[in-house]
Image: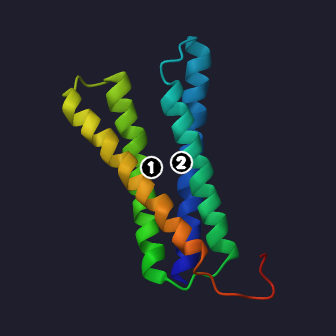
Amino acid sequence: MEQEKWSLRFIRIAAIFGLIGALIGSHMAGAESYAFRPIHAHILLVGWLSMFAWGAFYKIYKVRAKKLLTAHGWTAILGSIGLTAGMWLQFIKPFGINEVFSLVFYICGGAILLISFALFIFITFMIEKDVKQIG
């Protein structure tokens, strides 16, 4: 049951990231300014695409390692938000925040996201075999 919750969480968060990415894309097109391009791309790739793919994976496959699933879920969410928000702070400098702080925020978000990708690799090898499942 916990896995079903993570599947839905990932898909809901993906939808939020998708909307934010689309709004940023619309803003860039309307303003004819592409300053948000790297942030827009990462929001759509790690926020929309990766989150959605993980949500679909958890809907299709049953994972044996429940604690690893939870660790993956939190690192994926925190890493995706941290990376994209950190990029925004680092590249756009919206509040005049100290550059060292924004760089550390950006790097930590990216590092946490890398951990989530590594955890997901292990999770793909810890699924229950079922005749009805793909693979």
Q: Where is residue 130 drawn, in percent x and y?
A: 74, 88
**Amino acid type of the residue that numbered disc 1 sits on in the rendered structure:** Ser
Viewer-side residue, 67 vs 14: 67
Point out which mark residue 80 bears: 1
Q: Earlier in the sequence, mark 1 or mark 2?
A: 2
> What whole-number distance in Å separates the C-alpha atoms at marks 1 and 2?
6 Å
Q: Is residue 127 visible?
A: yes
Q: Position of residue 10 (x, y in %)?
A: 55, 61
Colour theme: rainbow
- Around disc 2, counting alpha carbons within 10 Å, would you say few (fewer than 14), some (14 to 19), or many (20 or more)? many
Tell me if mark 1 has few (under 14), some (14-19) or many (20+) residues whose alpha carbon lies within 10 angstroms of its own: many
Helix, strand or loop under label 2: helix
**Would you say the residues marked 1 and 2 are in contact, meaning their CB atoms lie under 8 Å apart?**
yes
Q: Is residue 73 above or below residue 37?
A: below
Residue at 45% from the left image edge and 76% from the top image edge: 68
**In the visual, does 80 lie left or right of 104?**
right
Mark 2: which amino acid? Gly
- Check disc 1 and report its element: helix, strand or loop: helix
Identified at 23% across, 22% down, the residue is: 96
| Nearer to us in this view, 94 or 106 | 106
Q: Which mark is residue 47?
A: 2
Q: Residue at x 53, y 66 (%)?
A: 120
